[in-house]
Amino acid sequence: MALNKRELFLKRRLRVRNKLRKISDGRPRLSVHRSSKNISVQLIDDVKGVTLAAASTLEKDLGVVGKNNVEAAAKIGAAIAERAKQAGVEEVIFDRGGFLFHGKIKALADAAREGGLKF
């Protein structure tokens, strides 16, 4: 029963999402997506089904267009923390999806914590 990388990623994503659903307690979800060229993050209210804030390396005003490295992830983390404060959100649940918590994902989470988000 050998699984390829994609199947392992999907299993991990479902496992993480199901655990978060149990402990969310009405807090918004900070969802991270990483592609080969960009990083994006959204602050999602699952109760109402709306996106409260978002940040991505595709935004020109952040100065990291088309970059996918640790420095870009840190800038995105700081940006989402600032936008979450403007939306009135302080506590979130961190949804890393199927991505492992190291490198870019860890840098984004650390920058968001330094920006004032609690998770």
Image (cartoon, rainbow, N blue to C red):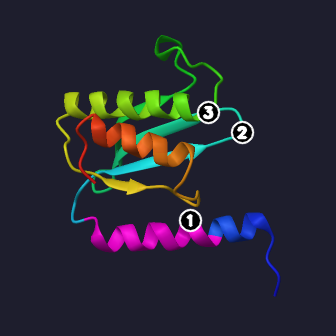
How many neighbours does mark 1 have within 10 angstroms: few (below 14), some (14-19), or many (20 or more)?
A: some
Tag 3 and tag 1, C-beta contact below 8 Å: no
SS at circle 3: loop
- Place of residue 32 in the rendered image (x, y in percent of width and height, measured from the top left): 49, 46
What is the secondary structure assignment of the residue under circle 1?
helix
- Whichever of labels 2 and 1 marks the residue nearer the N terminus, that label is 1
Dot label at residue 53: none
Quick check: is 16 in the magenta stretch? yes
Q: Position of residue 36 (x, y in %)?
A: 72, 39
**From mark 2 to mark 1, how far is it between C-alphas?**
18 Å
- Going by the numbered disc 3, the residue's amino acid type is Asn
Residue 55's place in the image compared with 27, above or below, is: above
In this rendering, would 95 be left or right of 105?
left
As drawn, 62 above or below 51:
above
In this figure, which residue is indicated by the disc labeled 3?
Answer: 69
Looking at the image, tell me whether mark 2 or mark 3 is earlier in sequence order: 2
Tell me which segment is drawn in magenta.
11-24
Q: Disc 3 or disc 1, which is closer to the eye?
A: 3
Q: Residue at x 41, y 35 (%)?
A: 77
According to the picture, the residue beneath numbered tag 1 turns out to be: 13
Residue 78 against residue 45 in the figure, above or below: above
Between 1 and 110, which is closer to the camera in this rendering? 110
Residue 14, position as x, y percentages in the image: 54, 70
Q: Which residue is mark 2?
A: 36
- The residue type indicated by label 1 comes to Arg
Residue lying at 57% horizontally and 36% vertically, measured from the top left? 39
Residue flagged by tag 2: what amino acid is it?
Ser
